[in-house]
Image: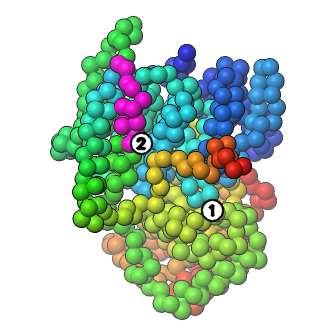
Amino acid sequence: MHLLYFDPGLGMMIVQAVAAGVAGVLLFSKGVMYKIKGFFGMNKDEDDTYDSIDVDENEDGKDDKKQ
Amino acid sequence: MGKMTKNNKTHEASFRDPSGHMFYDDDTLRRRINPIYFKQYNALKDSGFFATLFKNELLIPHKENSVFENEIIITPEPIPFITNPYEWSFEQFKHAALHTLKLQKYALTKGFILKDASAYNITFHKGKPIFIDTLSFDFYEEDTPWRAYKQFITHFFGPLVLASYHGTEIFKMLQTHIDGIPVKLISSLLPGKTKLSSTIYTNIHLAAKMESKHSEDYKAETKIAKLSKKAQNNILDNLFNFIKKMSLKEETEWGNYYDKTNYNDAAFQGKKELIQDWVSNLKPQRLIDMGGNDGTFARTVLSQVPNVIVTDIDSNAVAYNYKQVQEHKETNMLPFVCDVLQPAPGIGFNNTERNSLIDRLATYAPDVTMALALIHHITLSGNVPFNKSAEFFSKFSTHLIIEFPTREDSWVESLLVRKREFINHFDFYNQTEFEQGYGQYFDLEKKVEVKGTKRILYLYKNKQNGIA
């Protein structure tokens, strides 16, 4: 059970299906372009200092089998 | 503001979530967790979810103090100063948004979600964005859409897209919209060409339409569409990629300030040495440089002060400062945007949900306040009399290092000339009047002319001891 202590907005819940579909297409084409550009050595480094969306779990004590 | 009012008092910003609240135990800020949230809290703790977030510096670390049947008390690591979204530069805003998406994506992999994505759940600490609302996680229910999505759009994505077209002044709209800018308003403020961007179209324009269409579903009759975890990840990845690439095309007011001012190298060096000398004698724990541009002067004392804040009116200078913080991994420097003539007010319920800048500064209680090359802007651009600006600084400063550019200084000359026929109204801009005004609130300790300039550096001490 969720505690809906604020209104998530019904329209905003529904629109996510469309946003996800469009995002899927964009991510797929981005992946393709990345491979093509990579083949020609055209991938540029980004200058933004924030790292990636993925959490690096290798340093995580729980998941690290060596600890 | 005083300690008297703080004992065992609920934090004024902490009342919306029934899961628990923050409270002051004397001077220590702790969090009480209610039984309604015990299941979530224990799952988050036992699965190692919290531990991973602490390790990756994604969530503010906390220690568990006590576990009872009716409450669990935890104590989060103290954060010296909380900045609010309307005080961030574009880069800071961007990073806060990316941070939120990163947390939600990671939470999903572990069977949790971020139940809210309010921009106030992020602040800057040790040079980085950090999530501060420990109770914002809940269990993921298979195939449900992200229910904090609306908040993410109205708190983060919308304001960022607006700022990329209209400049960072847009962020100030969050002062009047504490729960984010309504998506309909965001949509109407964006140029028509943004409808051609499939990411902006779906997440803002279409979202606005859907909101209007379903706004009259009073009985909650419409079924909520299902959304697979994979689909939700696509939204998160796509928004992350989009936001990461965003940039600001704004000309800076002060960007090349140090290139175009009337400093020569020797004068710059002279002022730097004076400040280093005075600051090292005062041995401050906390220092704030108001109007400190990109932090150039504050950095000359950064190694000797454990906690440094630099504010500036120019969002670009703050962005440049933040960039340096990131690049040099500085953990004791906090830059944010502040217009001294219009400091951030107290907003939200009771006007206390988000504290005013002056309240937060009085609590922070800097040992040293620096105001270098600022007084002529306050006095001549803002028409603020000396005793009024002195009163402002006296509300939170113990020691004040203030630079007074005399009438012969080229910046002052230029500001005075621009007064045209009213120039005589500003005859009061002189050393004697300055010292009289500041003498009402401060005792003069030192006064030195900066060699090679037409500027005088003052060291003042607040007449009231223990101001906060």
Q: Which residue is mark 2?
A: B156
Q: Quadrant of residue B308?
A: bottom right
The x, y position of residue B334, in whole percent, is 58, 60
Between B191 and B49, the one nearer to me in the picture: B49
The x, y position of residue B171, in whole percent, is 41, 47
Q: Which residue is mark 1?
A: B331
Between B374 and B439, the one nearer to me in the picture: B374
Is residue B195 in view?
Answer: yes
Ranked by sequence position, the earlier of labels 2 and 1 is: 2
Local packing at callout 1 (Cα closer than 10 Å; few below 14, some 14-19, many 20+) is some
Residue B235 falls inside the magenta stretch: yes
Subunit that carries the residue with mark 2: B
The residue that appears at 81% across and 40% down in the rendered structure is B26
* B171 left or right, relative to B285: left
Residue B185's tag is: none
Residue B227 falls inside the magenta stretch: yes
Q: Amino acid at mark 1?
A: Thr
Q: Which residues are magenta?
A: B225-237
* A61 left or right, relative to B234: right
The residue that appears at 30% across and 38% down in the rendered structure is A23
Is residue B362 in view?
Answer: no
The N terminus of chain B is located in which quarter? top right
Between B409 and B369, the one nearer to me in the picture: B369
Mark 1, secondary structure of its residue: loop
The x, y position of residue B261, in whole percent, is 43, 81
Subunit that carries the residue with mark 1: B
Mark 2, secondary structure of its residue: helix
The x, y position of residue B251, in whole percent, is 32, 65
